[in-house]
Image: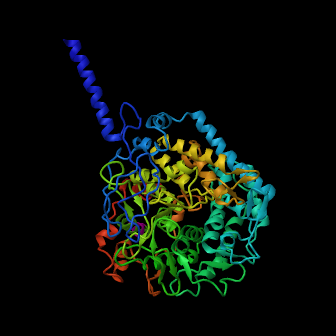
Amino acid sequence: MQWRALVLGLVLLRLGLHGVLWCVFGLGPSVGFYQRFPLSFGFPRLRGPDGAAPPAAPALSARPAAARGGAAGGRRRAPRRPGPGVCGPAHWGYVLGGRGRGRDEYERRYSRAFPPQLRAQMRDLARGMFAFGYDNYMAHAFPQDELNPIHCRGRGPDRGDPSNLNINDVLGNYSLTLVDALDTLAIMGNSSEFQKAVKLVIDTVSFDKDSTVQVFEATIRVLGSLLSAHRIITDSKQPFGDMTIKDYDNELLHMAHDLAVRLLPAFENTKTGIPYPRVNLKTGVPPDSNNETCTAGAGSLLVEFGILSRLLGDSTFEWVARRAVKALWNLRSNDTGLLGNVVNIQTGHWVGKQSGLGAGLDSFYEYLLKSYILFGEKEDLEMFNAAYQSIQNYLRRGREACNEGEGDPPLYVNVNMFSGQLMNTWIDSLQAFFPGLQVLIGDVEDAICLHAFYYAIWKRYGALPERYNWQLQAPDVLFYPLRPELVESTYLLYQATKNPFYLHVGMDILQSLEKYTKVKCGYATLHHVIDKSTEDRMESFFLSETCKYLYLLFDEENPVHKSGTRYVFTTEGHVVSVDKHLRESPWKEFFWEDQEGKSVHRPKSHELKVINSSSNCNRVPDERRYSLPLKSIYMRQIDQMVGLI
């Protein structure tokens, strides 16, 4: 009888331990995919902007959703957050179980650990991908801005057609790809090539060019890279190896200053303080310049301009960038708290009233949070806090929890900024950055679920189409220019969860890029994600972001992860160390401008809510604007990074 009691006790103990694991971590005797996740992105209960449901189309998943009634627009309350383990990796089997693949296949493939040898192989593949693109650029395109990888030649501004903004907004005749790739060389530990590249930039790159470029693109791609490389060179710890330059005299910082001065005319002669979208690097704002700009383009300059100001001890650059952010913020809707995507810089009227997470708005939200992380300005966090709450209230659709309850899985849609009503039924590939941003604030469960949506699309096409219609379940815009956003979110989710699933995702992305985009002299834009035809262009962000995030995903021992220094990535993927120096500014107690342009004393953090709400007292209740419960442990960790606590 005693041995029976002992056996029974051991059985009950084991069952109890498994029960605890399931409740706390979402784990049990097996980490297989036993929960089902009916991912059907038809959203039949969501109607189109005209109120009618579009015709049916084949579903992404194996089981189409049943028709359900319901309205699309209107105010939505902030969703209840699922507890730990609710939206864990257990749901992926069904997410990817469409197209004839059963649950068991994905259990076998994704539940197993990722062997160290395979991780090293994928790391080397990512490094080889970067090297193949970079070496071919240097051999066939330098000193021009970009590589045409199919015909193995360089590309610069389109002088024959100034209206070709797709090219001319980005290419300024300043060896863009070389400049943009500098810190990727350092992160990959290639000190000799990094030093060679820096010397080439110093010796050959000039901004005294008759080039009209977009302020936003020049800032994130060129200014940001120069600042990142300068910080790497001057870092006394040299975590990436010896990246010092003999007789270096802050040349990259001086070049960054020179470029920023040439961008400053964009902030002049604008009644709102919101900058013009383009400047000529020699002559300033063109006489026929457009008075309309997108929110992200005008409001995503603060990280780079702020770093430059604090390194130089000159408040000018941060001041103009921060004034633009506050001007846009004060134009948000009184009713929803949302911003539109295109604004007139002279009148402050919204030309584009669409509010979403993709093109035109994406990095505006990103830089509110990252500016706070870098500079510690509380108003940046408070603005992000309020913006995130409005996003949850009006853009989030679907059921409250990721993997339980009735309705469709969560998705963020495009709505009218004033009414919150659905404007269309598509999302664009830039929105895939948002799960990574959610990781930074600790909203990991929602990030996991949203990432599933974009990865399911990637699995279907081997790429992310530029625009995808979730109602028709088909691409609206078919090209894929080697964008990094899904890779970035995959990398950050792996860092947050250490779940090997995301290593498998990264391997899928790597293999797709190798299979479909590799050409004679580099990696080419996919013109059509279905037939896999290509275009002869390799944008600079492929080397500065896509390859970098893939490499870091598999390089567990990289100094970014192991050196003890905390880093933030800019919206172009440039690495910036988080330290006390960037949180110090001699102008902290000086003056700033209110929304009418009047000079007022800079408020203390406890005064900020009153100042922001006084001009629009009917906007939304303060408790809805500023009470978003950001995960306090994550925000405490951010502050601890720079020794504030």
Query: Which quadrant is home to the C terminus?
Result: bottom left
Left or right of 303, for residue 623: left
In this rendering, would 42 be left or right of 428?
left
Measuring from the top left, give residue 165's x and y in whole percent.
66, 73
| Residue at the image position 44 percent from the left and 87 percent from the top | 596
Q: Main secondary structure of the magenta part?
A: helix
Q: Nearer the viewer, residue 434 or 100?
A: 100
Residue 419 forms part of the magenta stretch = no
Can residue 564 be seen here? The reply is no
Question: Which of 573 and 475 lies nearest the eye of the viewer?
Answer: 475
Q: Position of residue 52 (x, y in %)?
A: 39, 67
Is residue 151 at all visible to an observer of this figure?
A: yes
Q: Which residues are magenta?
A: 381-385
Residue at 33% across / 52% down in the picture? Answer: 401
Q: Residue at x 32, y 48 (%)?
A: 404
Q: Is residue 402 left or right of residue 167?
A: left
Q: Up-down: is 506 above or below 443?
A: above
Image position, residue 580 (x, y; %): 51, 61
Above or below 306: residue 110: above
